[in-house]
Amino acid sequence: MKWFVPAACLLAGAVAGWFAAGLNLKRTPSTDALPSEWVARIDGDYITSEMFIDEMRRRGGLRPGQYQDLAQKRALLDELLFRRAVIRAAREAGLDREPDLVRATEQLLVSSYLRQSLGELQQNVQISDADVRAHYEAEAERYAVAPRRRLAAIRIEPERDAAGELDWSAAEARAAGVLEQARTLPASIPHFGALAQEHSSDQNSRWRGGVIGWLAEQAEPLDGAGLDAAALGAGMAIEQTGGFAGPLRGADAIWLLRLVDRDAGRGRSFEELAAGIRQGLHQQQLAKMEADLRQRLLDDVDLQIREPVLAAIDPLGPPADTQPPQPPALPGERS
């Protein structure tokens, strides 16, 4: 019966709310002293005058006209008694042991405890100007923008000759011819332009004039976004913007390189970085407080982990795909 599903969800949500709100109703065992002022009793639960007043306040009792007559008060009391009766019935039915409800209740407790334990401490965290300045002076070199350059590349793979061997000579001759064409490109084209699309086999850059992006000159080891190590070294050695290198034989292709742009790098001032440093130090303090609390709570419990049992639990899903992401298909390759 499809109509029953949303109704059941609403009832489950209401019961969960009653469970949470029901925490305010104190169950007083018969062996305990009775509360001095109580309004109603349902089984072993007492609704005290203090609890009832708190419920009135929570439900807008401070507004003019609210709970001025006995009928309004009785209506609220009836709702509280009904809620307690439903909570009792739900517990007897075992709903308080349902995994989803247990998980939600535990999460509520965790959130409330962390908010109470960490909230005030974290709100009072202050990062002094001296701390910010000391961090900047210690890390100024790390914050500097390192020299970098933007390269363009054409990758030409050698074809096999009649004997099945890679014909490097033919690939080098082809690259030399492409280089001659590149030297005649207008000044408005700082890379290889359409020549890359026509001649390069590097699918990641051929549609952008061969441009492979910015590369840090001081990176160790050099990372050239797929560039052959020898080609990358040659590209880093180009002196003038717009200059060329190659043809250069790499591990499996002939490369042509061009220096598209160059940034000499620069330091970054304290004023430029102060706000970000302060925020970072603040986050570090908050994280340390949370980590300290986590460790203290774990140290306070009797904890034992059975590593063999943990290792024997099978994953729920298949292993991750180890294949690298593939470039999009070319227009002629799409079905």
Image: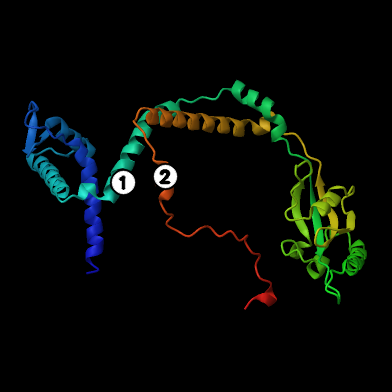
- The tag earlier along the polypeptide, 1 or 2, is 1
Question: For residue 265, what is the image quadrant?
Answer: top right
- Taking the image as shown, residue 176 lies to the left or right of residue 136, namely right
Instruction: Give the x, y percent position of residue 116.
Output: 35, 30
Instruction: State the image coordinates of residue 302 (x, y, percent, origin top left).
Output: 34, 31
Q: Position of residue 20 (x, y in %)?
A: 24, 42
Residue that sits furthest to the top in the current view: 130
Residue 308 numbered tag:
2
Residue furthest to the front in view is: 308
Q: The residue under label 2 is which amino acid type?
A: Pro
Q: Nearer the viewer, residue 34 or 250?
A: 250
x%, y% of residue 29? 10, 32
Quote the CA–CA distance across marks 1 and 2. Answer: 26 Å
Q: In this rendering, is residue 235 above or below 324?
A: above
Q: Circle 2 sits in a helix, a strand or a loop, which is it? A: helix
Q: What residue appears at the point 89 percent right and 55 percent down from the top-left corner?
A: 245
Please identify the quadrant where the C terminus is shown.
Answer: bottom right
- 132 or 16, nearer to the observer: 16
Q: Residue 103 bears which disc, if any? A: 1
Q: Residue 227 occupies which quadrant of the picture?
A: bottom right
Q: Residue at x 83, y 71 (%)?
A: 159
Residue 229 against residue 111 in the figure, above or below: below
* Quadrant including the N terminus: bottom left
> Front-most of 274 and 205?
205
Instruction: Give the SS element for disc 1.
Output: helix
- Total marks shown come to 2
Within-10-Å neighbours for mark 2: few <14, some 14–19, many 20+:
few
